[in-house]
Amino acid sequence: MRILAVTVTYNPDTALLGKALQSAAPQVQGLAVVDNGSANAEEIRTLVSAVGAHFLANQQNLGIAAAQNQGVDLARTTGFSHILLLDQDTVLTPGVVADLSANLAALEEQHGRVAAIGPAYFEVNSQQQTRAYRTHGLRLSRISLGSATQPVASDSIIASGSLIPLTVLDRVGGFKEDLFIDLVDVEWCFRARAAGYVSFLSPTAAVDHRLGSGTVKLGSRQIAIHVPIRNYYWVRNALWLARQPYTPLAWRLYFISRCLAFLGTYPTLADRKVQRLRLMARGIRDSLASRLGPLDP
């Protein structure tokens, strides 16, 4: 197993990025950074050079999916068998990649068609561990990983920290670039699921993850706060994904209900309320018209 770790950057905190790269470099056979037109690209280049990684600099922000696909193409042309996707602020603890690799190999022997395996994230802002999600008819179950010791199947997993065989990407296809950002990983997992592959979470591979800049509480739920433009992309992509034939029915209902929750929460509890409401309204219109890609000014 030869693993290329691919970190996508966009105006990162360079101190945190440095820690992230240093944590990943000793655990993989290769490391690449794909930058999406960051204002501090030269600082990023210096950090990348310090850890001996490959640097691919885009002149503009092409979106997370396009950058990830560039990493996949690099892995294919340079002799790697697997890709490890990472966010710019994902700091890996020692042994995480070894855990994912060993579990992936065991799962492939047991189950055959494994799409990807990812770590059990602890979300810093909400102080909650990620859960597995599985559908049963109209029901979407959230499965705690707290007492698990073996990998747990999940309909989708977060992209950052996910280990994916290139052979699966060859069969399922790459990441959908015109989603640009938000739910790119979910869409790919659903497509893989429809092709007969299963994704897993490893409860013994723990990684801290920061989702957004904070959270607001809606009943018993914690909803992450992102910059306003992310409200546009999430609502647009969620409603588009809810109409795709490979999206399970329970997830379609989830996306619709979540969009309604966003419309009730962000314009009342978050900052820049009017801007968020306008962006979500535009997201609904663009989704219904199947207008994807980057948001035009």
Image (tube, rainbow, N blue to C red):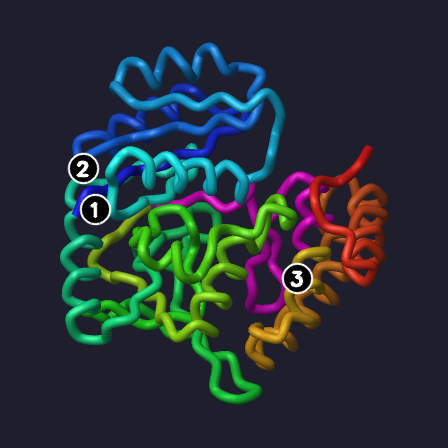
Image check: 53 left or right of 15? left
Instruction: Tell me the quarter of the image containing the C terminus.
Output: top right
Tell me what residue is drawn at x 44 percent, y 66 percent. 192
C-alpha separation, residue under disc 3 versus residue under disc 2: 34 Å
Which numbered disc covers residue 238?
Answer: 3
How busy is the neighbourhood of tag 2: few (under 14 within 10 Å), some, or many (20 plus)?
Answer: some
How busy is the neighbourhood of tag 1: few (under 14 within 10 Å), some, or many (20 plus)?
Answer: many
Q: Earlier in the sequence, mark 2 or mark 1?
A: 2
Tell me what residue is drawn at x 47 percent, y 10 percent. 42
Q: Label 2, on which residue?
A: 27
**What percent of the width, then of the height, locates residue 142?**
44, 74
Mark 1 belongs to which amino acid?
Val
Where residue 181 sits, quadrant-wise, is top right
How busy is the neighbourhood of tag 3: few (under 14 within 10 Å), some, or many (20 plus)?
Answer: many
Mark 2 and mark 1 in contact? Answer it, CB < 8 Å.
yes
Mark 3 belongs to which amino acid?
Ala
Mark 2 belongs to which amino acid?
Gln
In the depicted structure, whether residue 42 falls above or below residue 259: above
C-alpha separation, residue under disc 3 versus residue under disc 1: 30 Å
Dot 1: element: helix
Q: Label 1, on which residue?
A: 97
Q: Is residue 9 visible?
A: yes
Q: Is residue 149 visible?
A: no
**What percent of the width, then of the height, locates residue 177?**
59, 46
50 magenta-colored: no
**Count of marks overlaid on the render:** 3
The residue lying furthest to the bottom in this view is 137
Tell me what residue is drawn at x 80 percent, y 47 percent. 279
Region in magenta: 208-234
